[in-house]
Amino acid sequence: MGLFTRNTKRLQKEHEGQVKETFDQLGATLLKGVIPIADVKWREKVKVAGRVKALRVQPWADQVASLELTLADGTGGVTVVFFGRRTLGGVKLGTHLVLEGMTSEHHHLLTILNPEYQLLPRQVPLPY
Amino acid sequence: MTAPTESQPSAGPAPLPPASPVSIPESRSFRFKNRVLGNPLHTDQLEHERLGKPTALAVFASDALSSTAYATEEILHTLLVVGGVGMLAFTKVMPITIAVVIVLVIVMFSYRQTIKAYPSAGGAYIVTKDNLGVLPAQVAGVSLLLDYILVVAVSVSAGTAALYSVFSELYPYRVPIALFFIAVIALGNLRGVKESGKVFAVPTYAFVAAMFIMIGFGIYKATIGGGLEPIPLDQLDPTQIHEAEGVGLIGWFLLLRAFASGGAALTGIEAVSNGVPAFRDPTWKNARSTLMIMGTMLAFMFLGVSWLASQLQTIPVTGKTVIAQIADAVYGSSGFGQAMFVFTQFATMLILVLAANTGFADFPRLAHFQAEDSFLPRQLTKRGHRLVFSNGILALAGAAAVLVVVLGADVTKLIPLYAVGVFTSFTLSQTGMARRHLRLREPGWKTGLLINGAGALTTGIVTIVICAAKFFDGAWVIIGIIPIFCWVVVRLNHQYEAEKAELEEDATLAATAPILKRHAVVVLLDKIDRTSARAIQYARALNPDRLEAVHIAVDEQHAHELSTEWSNLPLKQISLDVRECPDRRINRTVLEVVSELAADGDTEVTVLIPRREYRSAWHRLLHDRTADGIAKALADVPHANVTFVPYHLTRSTKGQRIHKVEHGSMSGTVGIQH
């Protein structure tokens, strides 16, 4: 029945090792050039990674559709605004994202407008 | 000339700081929780520990295996002490045990089917809900909940019994010891026992080893070692066994009662099917083989212990369990023998305490399922500080503690209550499985139907037998409570559904409804002090269409003084309305004032009540709770809204009460400029 076989345990370990390696490689490519959010400056092209800490949804009757979210890593947070849409596939509270875009100002807050975004799997640790 | 720095406005806004810029002190209860339970767990950390078969066996088998520690004893107790059939009893132990084992095998094969059909979570509640409907599922749920409470009470009491069988001086303290065990297990579960697998493995396997060594030793002694002698009666306290010497007739009913007591051995079988998702892939295959190993071990251990008991003619007495007597007799009085005896007893105690933990694993989860279907209070669905269902754990610990105290941590008194619930849920879930086979007709459904049908029939008969046989021993309590509990649960569901229907009716429309034309703010005043000053300040910030201060004049002299003081205030546009209240019903008078304001149906009324916030419950006791009473009275008036304006009394005893001027606009005396 394989109750105490060492073989299954070894295979299990091996499999886990392979999975981890794949994610490490993925992380290395996705996170290339990412800077801590605390170092983000106004009017610069930046690449940051973090978790979605807050999402702001506008009611339907508003004229301009927009999705606003706060992305935070261990060093700080930044507001991100996507105009022209109300949802982003796969983006929920707690989702890890990698963003690349220009920083500007929106409602007196440092904001990245309409950035390029990528979902970061949970298995890849955030760099900051 | 100065070099541009980052703080200059030309650099634009800065990123948000990592933590909230406002520092909010943590409450005392939170700090206490942190100290006792550890730091709160992040919701992301909710992960299901996957168990390999050896660990899974240890985790899920403790409840089932541990019942061998008391099942034989309970059969003997029914035959000897209740039936008083004397030595004839020992010839009947084995047949009864075999009967129980046959039921065990049938149930085991039935649950093999359930595990395959419901690999996600196949508790009796889910299976019954899926196949027989929501109401039968409540019966299954309620009986299981009651049984989990009993699992905890019985296991902890039996564990205590194993302890005082070794240290007889502990016997008088059995209730506090049992309560201590419950507290320790509850605390461990509130912390979230993450390494539960390792915690479980040692005692479970130690117990299995202890039992098999003991049985092996017994068999060796009986065959090669010269045969087993019955324990001489004079070794035991004669006052406790005088009933045992009487010779009675063994009636069918007595045998059924003994069988019903032995049925307790089956509790815990369902644990594996409840926890299939916890197994490593392929989950259901691993779960199935674990179930089979567990059942086989249980059957052999139960048979072995019963056989030894019938050979040694052990007599259940208070103060020493049957297992302890067997171990004592088998191992003898040599040094090694005594060491083995103590080992057996400790292993037994540990596995029994862990079996209680099975209840703690299953009760909160089942309660959570039922509460999500709004059949139990909503509080049971909440995950607590450490991501476990804290309220369920506390409820279970409380209920089990009450049982232990009421019945004096006595296993014999608890056993008749036990097993009714388990067999009810067995029957319902097996019937549900049979129904499922008939409905879905998957490949091999005929075999499945046969197995589950047989399971449903057997467990159904056993349920009836247990109910009938143990009715007067105490099972009537459970048989009575289950329908009452079910009624309560269904009633609760109606309440929740009715509330939901009312609250959701036209909610979208109501949210976009136009606002009322006017806004009136009423500040309730008793005297002019810092609490009311805060309320007045806040009222002005609201900028309403109409603002007035209202004083309910219970004491005319006081009202007069207040009016004089008010007229001297340098405030504009706030009049003080003094209302008479000859019958001193303040709530009623406030209600009248507010109703008058809201009468036109187009005014939103905000009632501001200054309220002192006290540091401790002791301070609160010094004052009446007028404010809360008023708020309650106003709850029925449409468009009346109560706002408490808090004022924090910080150092009320030290004389230096006000150490900080709030909001700048106030100084020591009330001097508010409009």
Image (cartoon, grey):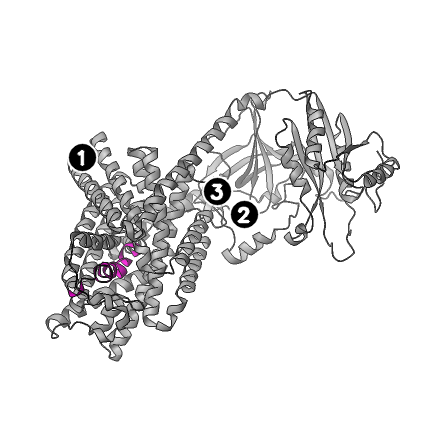
Residue A106, position as x, y percentages in the image: 65, 31
Q: Which residue is mark 3?
A: B379
Q: Earlier in the sequence, mark 1 or mark 3?
A: 3
Q: State left or right for residue A102 relative to residue B37.
A: right
Both marks 1 and 3 on one chain: yes
Q: Which residue is mark 2?
A: A128
Both marks 1 and 2 on one chain: no
Q: Secondary structure at mark 3?
A: helix
Q: Which residue is mark 1?
A: B445
- Between B416 and A92, which is closer to the camera in this rendering? B416
Q: CA distance from mark 1 to mark 2?
A: 55 Å
Crowd rating for badge 2 (residues with CA inside 10 Å; few <14, some 14–19, many 20+)? some
Chain letter of mark 2 equals: A
Q: Are marks 2 and 3 in contact (CB under 8 Å)?
A: no
Residue type indicated by callout 2: Tyr
Name the residue rendered at 81%, 31% in the picture: B574
- Between B141 and A119, which is closer to the camera in this rendering? B141
Quarter of the view holding residue B516: top right
- Magenta span: B62-87
